[in-house]
């Protein structure tokens, strides 16, 4: 930097004073651990030789052609954007793409470079920022972002300010690059931890469902032994006795036929509980309706059930794995409502909104007050089934009654692409 440029661009600040100021900037930013604190410190120090009402640093992210911004002094919609913004929308895209060495404008409001289709320039104009100076942040010859200064007044910046601004940008680039790499490493570590936690959750869920499957097998074995096998044994004894009779009365055969039909019905019920074949035969919606009818058929007290589909038939287009998981969750929730909550009204609703498919089971029972271990185990089984299909599970008090609402939500994209990594292995768990 020449003495002449220093005088013109920084009101005759001496080279020694300029050097001292750069050292102060370096010391100020060295201890900052985030971008916002860094740009705030820069703003406090550079005002000595670069006037500004607003300063920002925008940084290219790891994503293709995207960037984020951090601001000091005046805050605009640019720095408040919740997500990274495409570089193609940036009014300084030529800087970020390495096409220009700097941008200097006396009035951005009138500069055509800030006016193009899709330009994200409104924050600049809304804040009435006119004079603007932009220089690139570079590491090893590669642009990693840009440093920008703005003033409300017109014509504040001169060519000499460009040199000073670039010196500051070069001083900051290494710090910003280090922070950016650290932030990427932190996010990568968080993603890895989330993946690990999800995998651990799946393993734990698989273990719980394996235990539940074994319990279910034991229950089926007991049902077959205590009911069907006992009935068939009695029938066998009766047939042996009748074989010794020279004449078999018709009434005896009728009785045997009725009892045999009863055994068959019991066997069908056990098989149906083990696997909801109605899903294969008629689809998800018919399966849920059949489930509700069976659930209340053997109840002495009146229970009102209702199933509503607000998706226009989406349930029937679900993959079999998803249908079974949602069917089992509904089955558990309905059984809990009848057995533990003493509900007299149960409604099941399938809806779709904002890219999400939602299954809700609502009852007017006693609510979440039971400490029955079977009840709590059933809730965990429902939660695990939801986890295994990458769905969100919640259970909370119903909005319009003292009862409970079980809700399962999943992205609509899961309807056509199975979210389970090992479908053949997990199908055994989901189908139990």
Image (tube, rainbow, N blue to C red):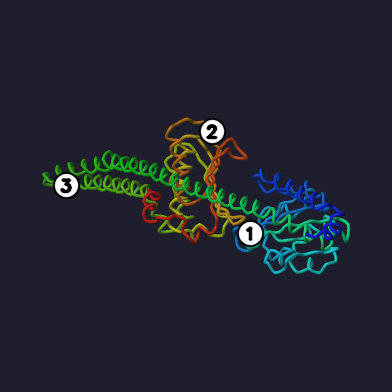
* Front-lying residue, 412 or 118: 118
On the image, the x and y values in percent for residue 197 come to 47, 45
Q: Quadrant of the N terminus?
A: bottom right
Classify mark 2: helix, strand or loop: loop
On the image, the x and y values in percent for residue 155 come to 88, 61
On the image, the x and y values in percent for residue 68 come to 68, 56
Residue 139 marker: 1
3D distance between C-alphas at marks 2 and 3 = 55 Å
Tell me the mark number nearer the camera, choosing from 2 and 1.
1
* Front-lying residue, 186 or 181: 181
Q: Which residue is mark 3?
A: 248
Q: Residue, x 48% and y 43% (percent of image)? A: 383
The answer to whether residue 231 is seen in the rendering is yes
Looking at the image, tell me whether mark 3 or mark 1 is earlier in sequence order. Answer: 1
Q: Which residue is mark 2?
A: 366
3D distance between C-alphas at marks 3 and 1 = 101 Å
Classify mark 3: helix, strand or loop: loop
Q: Quadrant of residue 128?
A: bottom right
Q: Residue, x 37% and y 56% (percent of image)? A: 424
Tell me the mark number nearer the camera, choosing from 2 and 3.
2
């Amino acid at each position: 930097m020449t003495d002449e440029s220093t005088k013109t661009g920084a009101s005759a600040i001496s080279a020694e004073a300029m050097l001292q100021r750069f050292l102060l900037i370096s010391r100020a930013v060295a201890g900052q651990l985030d971008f916002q604190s860094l740009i705030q410190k820069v703003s406090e120090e550079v005002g000595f030789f670069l006037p500004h009402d607003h300063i920002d640093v925008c940084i290219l992210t790891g994503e293709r052609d995207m960037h984020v911004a951090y601001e000091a002094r005046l805050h605009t919609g640019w720095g408040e954007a919740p997500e990274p913004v495409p570089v193609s929308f940036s009014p300084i895209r030529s800087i970020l793409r390495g096409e220009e060495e700097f941008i200097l404008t006396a009035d951005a409001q009138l500069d055509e470079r800030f006016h193009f289709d899709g330009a994200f320039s409104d924050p600049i104009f809304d804040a009435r920022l006119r004079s603007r100076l932009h220089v690139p942040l570079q590491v090893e010859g590669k642009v990693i972002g840009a440093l920008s200064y703005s003033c409300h007044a017109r014509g504040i910046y001169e060519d000499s300010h460009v040199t000073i601004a670039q010196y500051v940008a070069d001083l900051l680039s290494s710090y910003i690059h280090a922070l950016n790499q650290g932030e990427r490493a932190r996010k990568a570590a968080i993603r890895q931890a989330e993946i690990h936690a999800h995998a651990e959750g799946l393993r734990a869920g698989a273990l719980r469902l394996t235990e539940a499957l074994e319990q279910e097998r034991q229950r089926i074995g007991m049902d077959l032994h205590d009911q069907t096998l006992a009935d068939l044994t009695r029938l066998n004894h009766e047939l042996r006795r009748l074989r010794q009779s020279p004449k078999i009365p018709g009434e005896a055969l009728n009785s045997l036929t009725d009892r045999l039909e009863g055994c068959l019905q019991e066997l069908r019920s056990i098989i149906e509980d083990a696997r909801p074949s109605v899903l294969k035969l008629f689809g998800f919606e018919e399966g849920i309706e059949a489930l509700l009818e069976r659930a209340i058929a053997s109840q002495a007290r009146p229970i009102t059930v209702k199933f509503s589909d607000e998706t226009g038939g989406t349930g029937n287009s679900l993959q079999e794995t998803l249908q079974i998981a949602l069917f089992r969750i509904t089955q558990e929730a309905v059984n809990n409502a009848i057995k533990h909550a003493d509900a007299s009204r149960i409604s099941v609703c399938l809806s779709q909104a904002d890219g999400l498919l939602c299954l809700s089971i609502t009852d007017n029972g006693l609510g979440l007050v039971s400490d029955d271990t079977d009840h709590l185990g059933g809730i965990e089984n429902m939660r695990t089934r939801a986890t295994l299909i990458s769905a969100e599970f919640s259970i909370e008090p119903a909005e319009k009654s003292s009862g409970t609402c079980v809700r399962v939500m999943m992205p609509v994209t899961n309807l056509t692409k199975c979210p389970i990594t090992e479908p053949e292995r997990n199908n055994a768990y989901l189908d139990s």
